[in-house]
Image (spheres, rainbow, N blue to C red):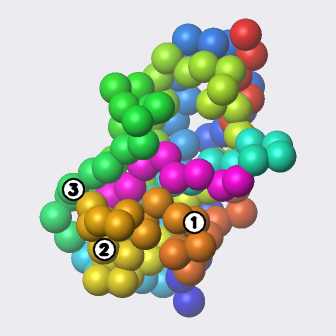
Amino acid sequence: EVQLVESGGGLVQAGGSLRLSCLASGLIFDDYAIGWFRQAPGKEREGVSYISIHDGKTYYTDSVKGRFTISDVDAQNTLYLQMNNLKPEDTAVYYCAAELADKINLGAKPARYTDYRSWDYWGQGTQVTVSS
């Protein structure tokens, strides 16, 4: 069974940094893609960043390019989302998600992978709050 556990959220001032962690288990990493999504109150869940574990290719939504960095899985089966220069509009619950790479097809057009409904496995989320 695929399990994902996020941690690392918190309260930070604008311009600050946070590193989110996603501990993954129950999957063969080379077969999967990992995505980070976020959901602000009253808004739909949106994709932030994605990584193909097999080849290390990464993708970012425009609003976080140059500020956020997604990492590959490490020896502790953990992936990270490093978030720098945080803005109040980054405030949301952040989730990591997993899906079979062949199914989610990162980088393809149309970009189904940016739709949260295309991903089957989810963590419980971690709150990120950025104060102005």
Q: Earlier in the sequence, mark 2 or mark 1?
A: 2
Give the alpha-carbon distance from disc 3 to disc 1, as whole Å: 19 Å
Give the alpha-carbon distance from disc 2 to disc 1, as whole Å: 13 Å
Q: Amino acid at mark 3?
A: Lys
In the image, which residues are magenta?
A: 44-53
Disc 1 element: helix
Question: Which residue in the protein does label 2 denote?
Answer: 105
Residue at figure coordinates x 48%, y 72% from the top left: 98
Question: Which residue in the protein does label 1 denote?
Answer: 116
Any mark on residue 57, and which? 3
Residue at figure coordinates x 29%, y 65% from the top left: 109
Image location (x, y in percent) of residue 48:
49, 46
Residue at figure coordinates x 66%, y 26% from the top left: 89
Viewer-nearest of labels 3 and 1? 1
Disc 2 element: loop
Q: Are marks 3 and 2 in contact (CB under 8 Å)?
A: no
Q: Amino acid at mark 2?
A: Asn
69 lies above or below 112: above
Q: Amino acid at mark 1?
A: Tyr
Residue at figure coordinates x 75%, y 47% from the top left: 43
Give the alpha-carbon distance from disc 3 to disc 2, as whole Å: 11 Å
